[in-house]
Amino acid sequence: MIPTRDDAVQIDFDDALARLQVRNMEVFDDHDLANSLTQGLGLPATVVPPAGIPPIFPVRAKVSFDIVWNGAIDTAQITNTSE
């Protein structure tokens, strides 16, 4: 998880709409999942046949995205009775 600014999230319960907007978030580009899981160190072919995982170290990167959720299918009132 990465913290974002408070104004990056907008929620409208009446219209069943939520939005997350992030600009220029600093992240690491791990090249691929294998290098992410090995922290860029790779693994030799003796461990991961036939070719192993070549070491590719992460580089700094920036990402931006705009995600919108909408269209609630159903709603419900929930009460916590354990208190």
Image (cartoon, rainbow, N blue to C red):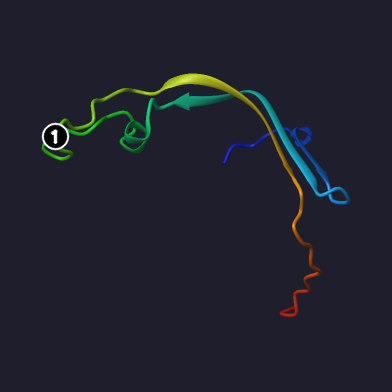
The residue lying furthest to the right in this view is: 14
The residue lying furthest to the left in this view is: 46
Residue 63 pos. (x, y %): 58, 23
Viewport quadrant of the C terminus: bottom right
Q: Amino acid at mark 1?
A: Pro
- In the image, what residue occupies the spot 79% across and 33% down? 7
Residue 69 pos. (x, y %): 72, 43
In the image, 77: left or right of 56? right
Nearer to the camera, 45 or 14: 14
In the image, 17: left or right of 2? right
Residue under label 1: 50
- In the image, what residue occupies the spot 56% across and 20% down? 62
Q: Identify the element where label 1 is drawn.
A: loop
In the image, 82: left or right of 32? right
Nearer to the camera, 83 or 75: 75
Residue 31 pos. (x, y %): 38, 25
- In the image, what residue occupies the spot 80% across and 45% down? 17
